Image: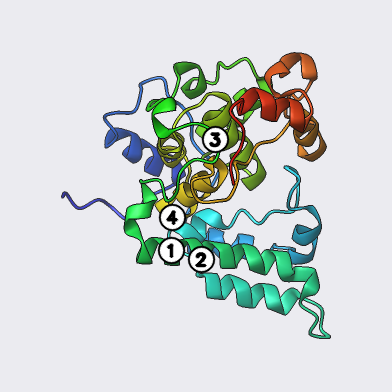
Amino acid sequence: MENQPKTFANRDALISHVRAISPSLAPDDSHVSDTVGGREAGVGLLEKIDPIAYGRSRNYLGGAVSYLSPYIRHGILSLNEVRNFALELGPKDGDIKPIEKFIQELAWRDFWQRVYQQNPSWIWNDVEDYKTGFAPEDYSDTLPEDVSTAQTDCAAINYFITTLQTTGYLHNHARMYLAAYIVHWRRVKWQAGARFFLAHLLDGDPASNNLSFQWVASTFSNKPYFFNLENLQKFSHPQAPCEEADNLALAGSYDDLAARLFPNGVSS
């Protein structure tokens, strides 16, 4: 492989170089993430984290998330370094409870990596049977075009897809919404959804991404994860179009949606 330059005069020069060595990039694809790489940028974000606020608001799409995941994914920051920094910001009486959720998320990332290390075949193969009342052959192997182009009949889902493709990032709750939509509403194999995510996520790695997809699909959990429009409206932010008229496929009670999505019943 040809050696690539490691330093550039400025960010524009870096972007131009990446375009030049990316023959599969569409000529009209002008999307460039605002995320800046490097140790300096990673440490700068680390110094801004608020693990206590994170614990209170992490499920909200506008919550106090850290945006550290790309830097952890690519080894710029270590889990140990982030954990120790968070502990320094915790209550001085030693009570870890206010920052517990932040530490737990770091632990989940470590957990996925260890599962991958011990069971590498699980990353692209079903760990267990689907609990959805459907067999693997009932799911499509390919992602529908309206999903890959953000042209579905759900405005909120299109918003999440566009955000993923243009920024290389999605809030974890939005990832769960989009993954559930792909697998359960569109009945597409989780592997196709996982490949789609990995093609765009700056923090994407097979362990966290694929095993989380399997958790949503129910092939690595005891039931499928799904949501309804009311839940999305509760945790979303004003930028996401969550009006019922624009998201009819997501509307209804959990019982209504379960009957619609899993007509054969959900097994445990």
Alpha carbons under labels 1 and 4: distance apart: 8 Å
Secondary element at tag 3: helix
Q: Earlier in the sequence, mark 3 or mark 4?
A: 3
Q: Residue flagged by tag 4: what amino acid is it?
A: Ala
Q: Earlier in the sequence, mark 2 or mark 4?
A: 2
Q: Residue flagged by tag 3: what amino acid is it?
A: Leu
Residue under label 3, please give it.
164
Q: Nearer the viewer, mark 1 or mark 4?
A: 1
Q: Earlier in the sequence, mark 1 or mark 3?
A: 1
Q: Where is residue 67 drawn, in percent x and y?
A: 61, 53
Give the residue displayed 42% in from the left and 51% down from the top.
127
Q: Residue 111: which numbered mark, if any? A: 2
Residue under label 1, please give it.
115
Give the residue displayed 54% in from the left and 75% down from the top.
80
Q: Residue 207: which numbered mark, if any? A: 4
**Is 129 placed left or right of 50 in the picture?**
left
Alpha carbons under labels 1 and 2: distance apart: 6 Å
Give the residue displayed 54% in from the left and 37% down from the top.
167
Secondary element at tag 4: helix
Q: Nearer the viewer, residue 27 or 94?
A: 94
Q: Nearer the viewer, residue 211 or 53?
A: 211
Q: Earlier in the sequence, mark 2 or mark 3?
A: 2
Asked whether the beta carbons under mark 1 and mark 2 sit within 8 Å of each other, the answer is yes
